[in-house]
Amino acid sequence: MKGAIFDLDGVIVDTAKYHYLAWRGLAEKLGFAFTEADNERLKGVSRMRSLDILLTVGGVTLPEAEKERAAAWKNAKYVEYISRLDAGELLPGARDYLTALRERGVKTALGSASKNAGLILARLDIAGLFDAVVDGTRVEKAKPDPEVFRLGARELGLAPADCVVFEDAAAGIEAAKAAGMRAVAIGRPELLPGADAWIAGLHEALG
Ligand code: BG6
Ligand code: MG
């Protein structure tokens, strides 16, 4: 491994709960319940695609302009939550593993679907741990498309085969494999098939 590319939400930082609270708030406003089990389907999925899934769960159809407003409402709620993030919400092993890799000369990149990645990295003061940052503001196609990881490898100056992706979402594992990279899943094989290895979190990668 010459380069390690990390997903953000659910790999580096525990933000899934805030995405969930914000989506649940939107569902309440629209008059239906949205459970944590429903929320599993949104992991790794782009904001607008997540909204489509949520509306399907509620059996609600909205015109395009309303959908834009609904997504903006959800994001404003989410940003309220993550504006208060602190280092305690970094996942176990994240900072130490990134630091250890860099000390070994492995290049590091972020490969996230989130358009809020910049804010999260700033809140946690970890932007300096990445040689390249590729997020949802920089790609056209969302995971499972490989664009985000291909761009990450390119910015590190590495071939895809020399990069390993760390991901907690099925769409992200699919994207990593489509990019020609090895994929380490953060989670269980039943939920994340197709990866090359499975760990419970980056603390296990520290070894
Ligand atoms: C991914 C999350 O990292 O980013 C998804 O797993 C989220 O749940 C997606 O929908 C887009 O994030 P944002 O911050 O741009 O709405
Ligand atoms: Mg994730």
Image (cartoon, rainbow, N blue to C red):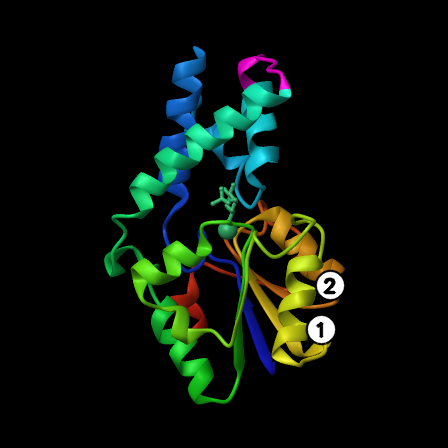
Q: Residue furthest bottom?
A: 104
- Residue at the spot of label 2: 179
Mark 1 Cα-neighbour bin, 10 Å: few <14, some 14–19, many ≥20? many
Identify the residue at image location x=58%, y=52%. 189
Q: Secondary structure at mark 1?
A: helix
Q: Position of residue 129 (x, y in %)?
A: 41, 75
Task: Give the magenta-colored segment's residue range.
Answer: 57-63
**Residue 101 shown in magenta:** no
Give x and y (percent) for residue 86. Answer: 25, 56
Compared across the picture, whether 113 is left or right of 33 comes to right
Residue at 65% from the left image edge and 49% from the top image edge = 143
- Please, is residue 107 above or below residue 41 in the view? below
Tag 2: amino acid? Ala
Q: Which residue is mark 1?
A: 160
Q: Main secondary structure of the magenta part?
A: loop
Q: Give the image quarter of residue 63.
A: top right
Q: Please, what is the three-letter code of the amino acid marked with disc 1?
A: Pro
- Along the horizontal axis of the image, is 12 left or right of 145? left
Are the two marked residues, 2 and 1, in contact with CB atoms closer than 8 angstroms? yes
Graded by Cα atoms within 10 Å as few (under 14), some (14 to 19) or many (20 or more), the crowding at tag 2 reads many
